Image (cartoon, helix red, strand yellow):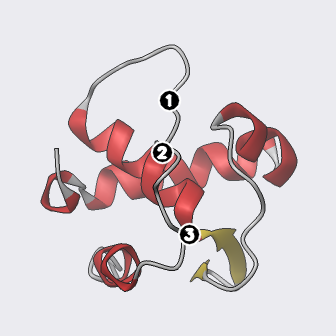
Amino acid sequence: MSLADMTAEGVRRALTEFDQLGRNAFLAKYKLGKAREYFLVDGGKRYDSKAIAGAGHGYSTVVRIAHLSCPPNFRAGSRQWLLGLSRWDSR
């Protein structure tokens, strides 16, 4: 699975889940800490980029795992992930 597998629909579903659960519960579900520097901004709201990328990728690949989590070597500061998220902007 790669960044190319992520879809706009998967990212939208992750954003919706983030809004429904709230930041703390969403991050806890995916076992991730709060973003310090990189955020995805949508509709004036800031979202933790690493968590949205992980959840969005999971939704995109339709792999349903009870608790999706990112590997320990997954880095939020990766420009590749940020550039990948930005290309799914549907506006």
Image coords of residue 8 (percent x, y): 29, 61
Residue 61 figure quarter: top left
User: What amino acid is at disc 2?
Assistant: Ala
Q: Nearer the viewer, residue 11 or 31?
A: 31
1 or 2: mark nearer the eye: 1
Label 3 to label 1: alpha-carbon separation: 15 Å
Mark 2, residue position: 55
Element assignment for label 1: loop
Residue at point 59% right, 50% down? 16
Residue at point 62% right, 43% down? 17
Residue at point 53% right, 46% down? 72
Q: How many marks?
A: 3
Q: Are marks 1 and 2 in contact (CB under 8 Å)?
A: yes
Position of 38 with respect to 57 (left or right) is right
Q: Earlier in the sequence, mark 3 or mark 1?
A: 3
User: What amino acid is at disc 3?
Assistant: Ser
User: What amino acid is at disc 1?
Assistant: Leu
Q: Which mark is residue 49?
A: 3
Pick the quarter of the image with the C terminus: bottom left
Q: Which mark is residue 86?
A: none
Image coords of residue 31 (percent x, y): 68, 38
How packed mark 1 is, by other alpha carbons closer than 10 Å (few <14, some 14-19, many 20 or more), is: some
Residue 67 figure quarter: top right
Element assignment for label 3: helix
Element assignment for label 2: helix
Residue at point 80% right, 53% down? 23
Pick the quarter of the image with the N terminus: top left
Mark 1, residue position: 68
Q: Earlier in the sequence, mark 2 or mark 3?
A: 3
